[in-house]
Amino acid sequence: MKFSLVLLAAALSAQTWRFDNLKKIGGLKPTVEGNPKVVQSPKGKVVQFDGDGDALFFDVHPLAGAETFTWEVIFRPDCDGRKEQRFFHLQEEGSQYRLLFETRVGGGVWYLDSFANSASGSKALMDAKLTHPCDAWYHVASVYDGKEFSNYVDGKLQGKAEVKLTPQKAGRTSAGVRINRVDYFKGALHSARYSRTALTPAQFLKK
């Protein structure tokens, strides 16, 4: 019963964004730049980015105020994009405090870069030895339990470190590029989920 209550609380605190259109995502109207396209995929409709100017911006930081969190994304990285690609970015307004996901792409494979920067500490998690084939669908997650920051690909741990992360304040979000329009992403986004609790891999979204 206790475990069920934990799952229920996690579900109630979660916010999901489904990238299946360009008019309203997660109940929000995005600012569209470039020419991202809604296309059919084996996972249904998704938003595809060309790596050369396509981006979506949102006037909200979905994890603002979160003392613990799990940030999940289901996405497809393409092989022929830039070496460094920022596919998701959450930023506190008026500061450099941010959370982000990047890929490092080369030789037909990629590896994950998750970064968190706050007033009390920051940490980058990436391991160039943990590579994955491009042009396939993946689930990635960054998790913070109040003491440890960790990241995952398809439920498998990629890295972890102890760090103190202060909750971030209100801000903005970009998908497909950095907030400052650098390092565009080539590939597609299916969905993102933001939970204000540290989930286990068994509780992650199903890819």
Image (spheres, rainbow, N blue to C red):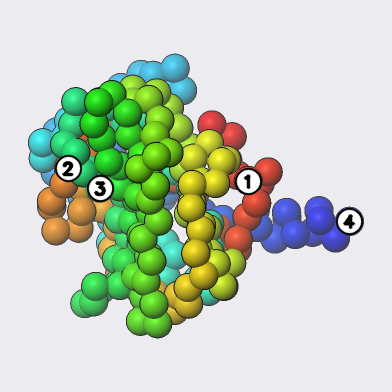
Residue that protrudes farthest toward the right in the picture:
1
Distance from the alpha carbon under mark 1 to that under mark 4: 20 Å
Q: Residue at x 45, y 32 (%)?
A: 138
* Residue type pointed to by label 3: Arg
* Residue type pointed to by label 4: Met
Asked whether residue 186 is in view, the answer is yes
Asked whether residue 46 is in view, the answer is no
Q: Residue at x 53, y 36 (%)?
A: 154
> N-terminal of the two: label 2 or label 1?
2
* Residue type pointed to by label 2: Tyr
Give yes or no for contact between labels 2 and 3 (Cβ–Cβ under 8 Å). yes
> N-terminal of the two: label 2 or label 3?
3
Q: Quadrant of residue 171?
A: bottom left
| Label 3: how many Cα within 10 Å (few below 14, some 14–19, many 20+) | many
According to the picture, the residue beneath numbered tag 2 turns out to be 184
Is 33 positioned to the left or the right of 117 in the image?
left
Q: Residue at x 54, y 31 (%)?
A: 207
Is 44 positioned to the left or the right of 185 in the image?
right
According to the picture, the residue beneath numbered tag 3 turns out to be 86
According to the picture, the residue beneath numbered tag 4 turns out to be 1
Residue 202: where, in percent of width, then height? 68, 43
According to the picture, the residue beneath numbered tag 1 turns out to be 201
Distance from the alpha carbon under mark 2 to that under mark 3: 6 Å
> N-terminal of the two: label 4 or label 3?
4
